[in-house]
Amino acid sequence: TETIVSLYAKGLTTGEIQAHLAEVYDVEVSRATAQVAQDLAAWRTRPLDRVYAVLLIDCIYIKIRDGAVANKPVYIAVGINLDGDRDVLGMRVGTGGEGAKQWMTWLTELRNRGVGDILIACCDGLKGLPESINDVWPQTDVQLCVVHLVRTSLRYSAKQHWAAIARQLREVYTAKTADEAEQRFVRFEEEWGQRYPAVIDTRRRNWEHVIVFMRFPAPIRRVVYTTNMIESLNSRFRQATRRRGHFPDDDAALKVLYLVIRNPIKNRANVTGKTPAWKQAINSLASYYGDRVTNH
């Protein structure tokens, strides 16, 4: 099974893996892949910690046949517990018309696996997701991913203005306080509001979820202001799925992604493992969230 994990994670197709195992080990792949399916099922239902300091939700698009072949989003949830340990908590394949009902189903699964509280959740502005997070965990602070917000702003603006807009938004998000960020954004709005009202409206509608991270010192800001921590994992997902063309169904796609998660690369940045400078971060969280941290 370990050999299967390694070969899938390197991006080999099932046919290539079958040929390799037959030539090198004189074995069939069917028994090993059946074991992988069982392991995946157990992994997706395993108990989780009661409290997570941070929940990160991101997605990657994969070609999956659902009647016709289509790019379907696969959403990945990564948790950082109170000891600073990072772990992929779960995955789900999205369907058309994402909304609160579908998010509630997935987030409730995480709660039913033991997650009773999350201090801060960082996510893209996916329709219905921030509201669903607070329906499941009412005390959770929801932070929209700043990097995704900047990318959205660039999509709404002309290319010749990208550098100036990105620079000025960076000044907003590096402000020392929320009040300072508001003042800088007012200046940004004065310069760009008439030309690009959609950029302004996106932030005004979500401002309470844009500036959550500004109440914290640098060690926590680096952890919660963006979902980019998952990018190294997404890169490996793309490598493992690129050569396959498309997957026959959702389960086949999830199986390959699970094998990538199980096969971290030594001496490389991986989403699992210890969070750097965590002692300083957890002390700052404890001073803000009190017994939600200290009584876990």
Image (cartoon, rainbow, N blue to C red):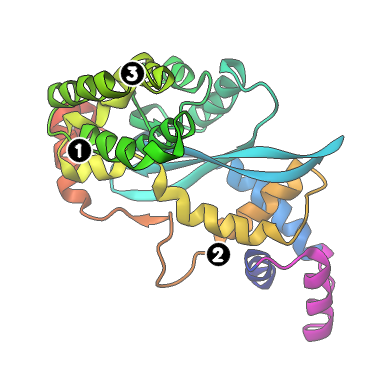
The three-letter code of the residue at mark 2 reads: Asn
Q: Secondary structure at mark 2?
A: loop
Asked if marks 2 and 3 touch (Cβ < 8 Å), the reply is no
Residue 49 visible somewhere in the drawing: no
The residue positioned 79% from the left and 78% from the top of the image is 20
Q: Quadrant of the N terminus?
A: bottom right
Distance from the alpha carbon under mark 3 to that under mark 1 = 21 Å
Residue 73 at what x, y percent from top left? Answer: 63, 37
Q: Reading the chain from its start, which is encountered first: label 2 or label 1?
A: 1
Determine if the magenta segment contains residue 13: yes
Q: Secondary structure at mark 1?
A: loop
Main secondary structure found in the magenta portion: helix
Q: Which residue is mark 3?
A: 193
Q: Reading the chain from its start, which is encountered first: label 3 or label 1?
A: 1
Left of 100 or right of it: where is 67? right
Residue 282 at what x, y percent from top left? Answer: 20, 42
Q: Quadrant of the C terminus?
A: top left
Q: Which mark's residue is nearer the viewer, 2 or 3?
A: 3
Asked if marks 3 and 1 touch (Cβ < 8 Å), the reply is no
Q: Which residue is mark 1?
A: 174
Distance from the alpha carbon under mark 2 to that under mark 1 = 36 Å
Determine if the magenta segment contains residue 171: no
The three-letter code of the residue at mark 1 reads: Thr
Residue 157 at what x, y percent from top left? Answer: 44, 31
Range covered by the magenta-colored residues: 11-30
The residue positioned 84% from the left and 79% from the top of the image is 22
Left of 265 or right of it: where is 175? left
The residue positioned 68% from the left and 56% from the top of the image is 241
Q: Which residue is mark 2?
A: 263
Q: Nearer the viewer, residue 288 or 221?
A: 221
The image quarter in which residue 215 lies: top left
The three-letter code of the residue at mark 3 reads: Gly
